[in-house]
Image (cartoon, coloured by chain):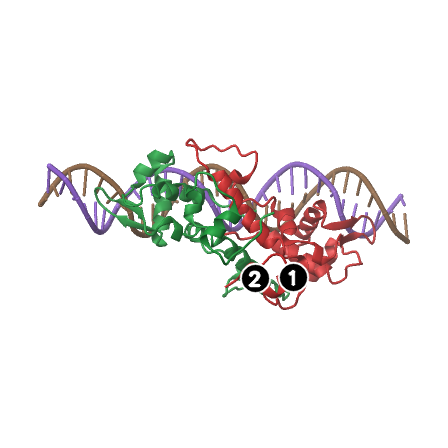
Chain colours: A green, B red, C purple, D brown
Amino acid sequence: MFKIGMLTDYGILILTHMAKNPQGWSSAAELSASLNLPKPTVAKVLKLMNHHGLLDSHRGKQGGYRLSRSPGRISITEILEAIEGPLHVTDCALPHASCQRIIQCDLPAHWRVVNEVIHSAIKEISLDFFCQSKPCGLVGYLARTSPSSTPNPS
Amino acid sequence: MFKIGMLTDYGILILTHMAKNPQGWSSAAELSASLNLPKPTVAKVLKLMNHHGLLDSHRGKQGGYRLSRSPGRISITEILEAIEGPLHVTDCALPHASCQRIIQCDLPAHWRVVNEVIHSAIKEISLDFFCQSKPCGLVGYLARTSPSSTPNPS
DNA sequence: CAATAGCGTACAAAATAAGTTCTATATTAA
DNA sequence: TTAATATAGAACTTATTTTGTACGCTATTG
């Protein structure tokens, strides 16, 4: 349940690798070799992330991709949505939902709320959280990055 | 992304319907007729939820299912996990993860944290939230049910 | 003992995801 | 200007997951 796709997993792996030299351009071939991932798939993931504004791209010789922003300014919700599409638990939660159910129900509004809860919970987590060699735990992380939001993991 | 399955959607629909008469036994056939959903599928969903302790079952004539607890004591995380399996964003997040990746990475620990964030965010939402004809919004809902947790939807 | 209703397993069809391939276009260096 | 390199975009195949159904079995009631 809520399992992310393999492409998204690759995406995080690629982005954390690129975060190590934020200035230089990394090509799909380079990243594929460094991370032992299939080249065409890496290219596909890079393409998706570039299309959603997470990367800058440069064609031709010595070309490649580069983070468009610092890791601290890239939320994992953006990465997830770039690769897997918009974040919504049901089609009911979408504004233009065309529900096929015969009987009427008030679920759409409820799912919209659930949706928002999940979204607001993870939007504070950014790429640089994944760049830490050992995660410090959520409380410490969120305390440092955003003083407003305070979820409580048990 | 994070879209729940149709079976889970059915599950909520079924549970909210059952919550309307908490004492009586509802059969799969009855629920199927009332909600205009395919009978075998309703039976499957009921079976799953019963197996995870959300329902009491009774065989034979006049048998059927009944909520095992009051709607306020059934978290949507239980419903989700009953139907879609354990809540984890990657297999990395599982304790006995056998990662096939060639290069070593520290992602598992990070995903575990993300996992926990989502889990703790939605665990406070229970079935009776879905039983309200119009949801009041999250802040009001959580304020009434649990004074400790305070996410902030924008 | 017959009718009802859940229990468990297995299976076929449909939808989705993953990975690959091919052609086009842009950039650089010789 | 030309050859090499690298992204852009689309189409396609294969694999996996999800959905929906079917069937034989067991328990309960009247």
The picture places residue D15, in percent across and down from the top left corner, at: 48, 37
Q: Is residue A100 left or right of residue B21?
A: left
Q: Is residue B37 visible?
A: no
Q: Observer-nearest residue: A55 or D12?
A: A55
- Label 1 belongs to which residue? B129
In which chain is the residue bearing label 1?
B
- Label 2 belongs to which residue? A113
The picture places residue B37, in percent across and down from the top left corner, at: 65, 57
Against B138, is A17 above or below?
above
Q: Secondary structure at mark 1?
A: helix
The picture places residue A98, in percent across and down from the top left corner, at: 53, 64
Q: Residues within 10 Å of mark 1 (few under 14, many from 20)?
A: many
Q: Are marks 2 and 1 on the same chain?
A: no
In which chain is the residue bearing label 2?
A
Q: Secondary structure at mark 2?
A: helix
Residue A68 numbered mark, or none: none
**Disc 1 residue type?**
Phe
**Disc 2 residue type?**
Val
Q: Is residue B79 visible?
A: yes
Asked whether the beta carbons under mark 2 and mark 1 sit within 8 Å of each other, the answer is yes
The picture places residue B131, in percent across and down from the top left corner, at: 67, 63
Which residue is at the far top? B102
Q: Residue at x 66, y 60 (%)?
A: B145
Q: CA distance from mark 2 to mark 1?
A: 10 Å
Q: Observer-nearest residue: A123 or B28?
A: A123
Give the image quarter of residue C29: top left
